[in-house]
Amino acid sequence: MTTPIPAEADWDRAPGLLEGAMDLELTAQDCDLRYWLQAVPQGTLRGRPDGHHPDLKVGPHMLRGPFYDAITQEYAFRALAEEKATRVLSFLVANAPDIPSMEFYATQLIDECRHSMVFRNHLVSLGVPAERLAEAVEEFASPYRETVIDPLEQRCLEVMRDERDFIGGVVMMTIILEGALAPAAELSERKWRPLDPAAAEIDKGAGIDEIRHLTVGAAIARQHLLDHPEDRPRVVEMIREGMRMWEELPTHQMVLDREVRFQEGLALHADIVGDYEIWPGRRLVDTTPEERQDTADAWSDEMKAKRLKYMGLEEALR
Ligand SMILES: [Fe+2]
Ligand SMILES: [Fe+2]
C-alpha cells in the first residue's frame, strides 16, 4: 500500500510559493518527522535527488556570458545563505521547547542543507570543475558575502546561540530571512523557467519546502504569543529591528546587479525566451530589471503584511 503524498508537498499539485505561504495553515504538529519522511523524501524529492529531473541538461547559452554571470552569482549566494541557515538552525533544534518543534526544525535543517547542496551542485552543471567548487562558491558570492551574509549570520548567532532565544530565532527565520527571500526565489523560478529548466525545478522544489518553513514558523510564533502575551512587545521590537537591518543591507543593489546581467542575456537570447510570460499577460522579454525587482518587492510586502496579521503582529509594520 502506498501512502498518499499531501497536496502541499506533491510536485504536481503543490501551490506556488506565494499562494501557499499566504493561504495555507500548517503547524509543527502537522509537520512532524513522520509527516516529513512520507511527504518529502518519498514525495517532493522522488526521482529528483539533485533537485531536478535527471534528464534536464543545461543549454550552451547558460555556460558563458551574462546568463552565466547572473546565475552563478545568484546560486553561489543562495548556496552560502542556505549553508549558514543550516548551521544556525542547529540552535533551534537544540533549544526547541517540545518534541513537535524539535522534530520540525530537525527536518527544516535537512531541507536547508539540501537546498545548499543543490544550488552548489548546479554550478557544476554550469561548468565549474567539481574539485574547485568550494572556492568558486566563495568567489561568485564574494561581492555580497561580507555586506549581506555576514551581518545576517552574526545577528542569528546572537539570538539563537548566545541568547538561546527560541522564539526570537523562529521570528528571525520566518519573518526576516525566509520571508524576505522567498519572493526573490519565486522570481528566480519564473525567470529561469524557459532558459534553464533544471534551475527552475531546483527553485520550485525549494519553494515547496519553503511553504512548510514559512507556515509552520508562523504557526509556532502565533501560538507562542497566544500563550505568552507578555512576550509581544519584545517580539514586535525584534521584528522592527530586523526589518530596519534588512533595509540597511545592500540586498536591493545585489538583486539589481543580477537583474541587469540577466537583461543583457535576454537581449542576446530573446529567441530562446520567445513569448514566454513571466506572469499572466507579461512577456519576459518585455520586462526590465527594475520591473522584475519591483514586482518581487511588492510580493514581499504583501506576504509580510498578511503573515504578520496571522501572527497577530501587524503593529510591527507601524
Ligand atoms: Fe532554503
Ligand atoms: Fe527554508
Image (cartoon, helix red, strand yellow):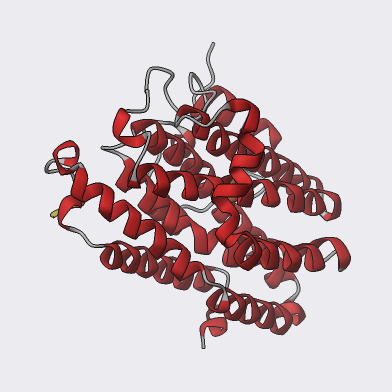
Quadrant of residue 228 within the rendered picture: bottom right
Residue 279 sits above or below residue 301 on the image: above
Residue 80 sits above or below residue 114 on the image: below
Q: Quadrant of the N terminus?
A: top right
Q: Is residue 55 visible?
A: yes
User: Residue 65: where, in percent of width, then height?
Assistant: 34, 43
Residue 218 sits above or below residue 30 on the image: below
Q: How many marks on residues?
A: 0
User: Residue 50: where, in percent of width, then height?
Assistant: 52, 26
Nearer to the camera, 317 or 86: 86
User: Residue 296: where, in percent of width, then height?
Assistant: 36, 63
- Relative placement, left or right, of 185 versus 170 is left
**Which residue in the rendered view is the most extreme toward the top?**
1
Q: Is residue 223 visible?
A: no
Nearer to the camera, 61 or 290: 61
Residue in the picture at 26% in, 37% down: 194
Quadrant of residue 311 within the rendered picture: bottom right
Residue in the picture at 81% in, 68% down: 158
Residue in the picture at 44% in, 27% down: 52
- Relative placement, left or right, of 71 versus 88 is left
**Which residue in the rendered view is the most extreme toward the bottom?**
318
User: Residue 139: where, in percent of width, then height?
Assistant: 59, 48
Residue in the picture at 44% in, 18% down: 54
- Relative placement, left or right, of 80 versus 282 is right
